[in-house]
Image (cartoon, grey):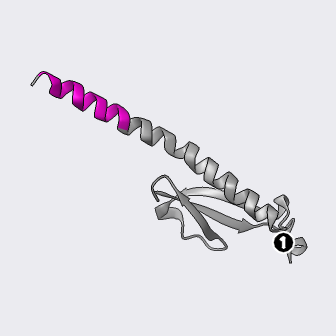
């Protein structure tokens, strides 16, 4: 019975570590997607990528291009005026 508090503490610490790692994993996924878009000929100034919680993913003028952190965040693609004409 004395082990129960230690086991509980270890479980809570591992859960908080996973939560802290989520933004880093999202940044890696975002970076990979950004590189793929650039490799397809879209200039870096022609788009933005943003990481948003799932409940904020339905935004006008955006397209969901990825997800991360166990599908709790979405990565949104938005065309900008700087490179939209160049990409077409």
Give the SS element for disc 1: helix
Q: Residue at x 75, y 57 (%)?
A: 35
Picture coordinates of residue 56 (x, y %)? 52, 63
Give the quarter of the figure containing the C terminus.
bottom right
Tell me where residue 41 sits by quadrant.
bottom right
- Relative to 84, say whether 16 is above or below: above
**Which residues make up the magenta segment?**
2-14
- Relative to 50, say whether 8 is above or below: above
Q: Residue furthest right?
A: 86
Q: Residue at x 46, y 63 (%)?
A: 55
Q: Residue furthest left?
A: 1
Tell me: 15 left or right of 56: left
Give the quarter of the figure containing the N terminus.
top left
Tell me: 34 left or right of 3: right
Q: Residue furthest top?
A: 2
Q: Residue at x 62, y 73 (%)?
A: 60
The residue tagged 1 is: 84
């Amino acid at each position: 019975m004395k082990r129960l508090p230690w086991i509980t503490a270890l479980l809570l610490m591992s859960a908080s570590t996973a939560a802290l790692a989520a933004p880093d994993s999202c940044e890696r996924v975002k970076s990979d997607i950004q590189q793929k878009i650039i490799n397809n000929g879209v200039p870096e100034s022609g788009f933005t990528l943003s990481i948003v919680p799932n409940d904020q993913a339905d935004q006008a003028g955006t397209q969901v291009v990825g997800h991360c952190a166990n599908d709790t965040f979405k990565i949104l693609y938005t065309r900008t005026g700087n490179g939209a004409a160049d990409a077409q």
